[in-house]
Amino acid sequence: MRVVPAPTTSVVAAITIGQTPRPDLLAPLRERVREGMTIIEVGALDELTADDIASRPPRPSASANRYPLTTRLRDGSVVTLDEDDLAPLVQHAVDRAQHAGADVTLLLCAGGFSDVTAPGPLVRPFDAAVATAQRIGARSVVVAVPYEGQTSSAHRKWVAAGFDVRMIVGDIAALDLPVDPVVDAIILDYVGHAARDVRALRARSSVAVIDLGECGAETAVASLATRGNEREAEVR
């Protein structure tokens, strides 16, 4: 567990599905935290070695619909694990963050982890991005994922959220942008895109670009501010 120092009255826990440190994933949150807020960074795989991870048996899944998620270990190596297999490890990371005093918890992942819980606000970037898309009135969306293996799962969750969906795969710096006039937004269904790449995509897009990492960070900071205001009101 790593703490990013700041004068603190409120604490946001950033939960990665891999190992810390992940400054790339924390960047959108760092850019938005205000004075009096501290970030705690906790990785779901922090307590495991590479051998531990490789030898973990898959969890029996109640659903045939698997959701592969790719993340990095501390040594820079990349691993792919299913959301169902990661879920108990993510829950343990959330519990550790709560024990450390987190007021708001942010999952730094595009997966939903619907069974993961926290006593206070738990921000899922997917839910935050859905709210953003609904707020701007988007109905027909292009959803971009970095890996082909994520297309089916991502398509399924965005359709279930009520959108008309077309999928594209690849590096956002080289995406072929939609020319369909009925497309309302491009959704980057990944947490970890560099801010410069997101800005570059927006500059060449004629429709809104919704980035899950940004949406999660904005929602977490807003929730943290609300918690801080509630705390001040209780003191008064």
Image (tube, rainbow, N blue to C red):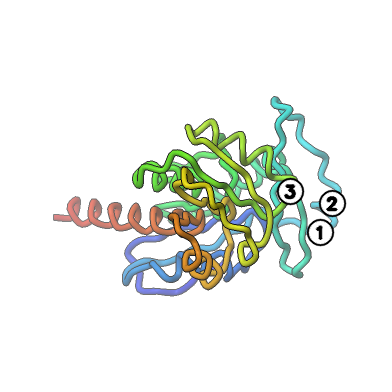
At numbered mark 2, what does the secondary structure look like: helix, strand or loop?
helix
Residue at 39% over, 53% down: 219
Q: Residue at x 76, y 35 (%)?
A: 59
- Check disc 1 and give the amino acid type: Ala
Cβ atoms under marks 3 and 2 closer than 8 Å: no
Residue drawn at x 78%, y 65% as measured from the top left: 77
* Three-letter amino acid code at the position of disc 2: Ala
Q: Which residue is mark 1?
A: 50
Mark seen at residue 54: 2
Measured from the top left, where is residue 23 in percent x and y? 57, 71
Q: Nearer the viewer, mark 3 or mark 1?
A: 3
* In the depicted structure, whether residue 146 falls above or below residue 140: below
Q: Residue furthest left?
A: 236
Q: CA distance from mark 3 to mark 1?
A: 24 Å
Looking at this view, is 169 or 100 the one in front? 169
**Quadrant position of the N terminus in the picture:** bottom right
Q: Secondary structure at mark 1?
A: helix
The earlier-in-sequence mark between 3 and 2 is: 2
Give the camera-side residue of 230 and 170: 170
Q: Could you say whether the residue bearing mark 3 is in a helix, strand or loop?
A: helix
Query: Which residue occupies 40% across, 55% down?
Result: 220
Q: Position of residue 108 (x, y in %)?
A: 55, 55
Q: CA distance from mark 3 to mark 2?
A: 22 Å
Mark 1 Cα shell of 10 Å, populated few (<14), some (14-19), many (≥20): few
Q: Is residue 226 above or below residue 130?
A: below
Q: Position of residue 170 (x, y in %)?
A: 68, 57
Report which residue position mark 3 lands on: 148
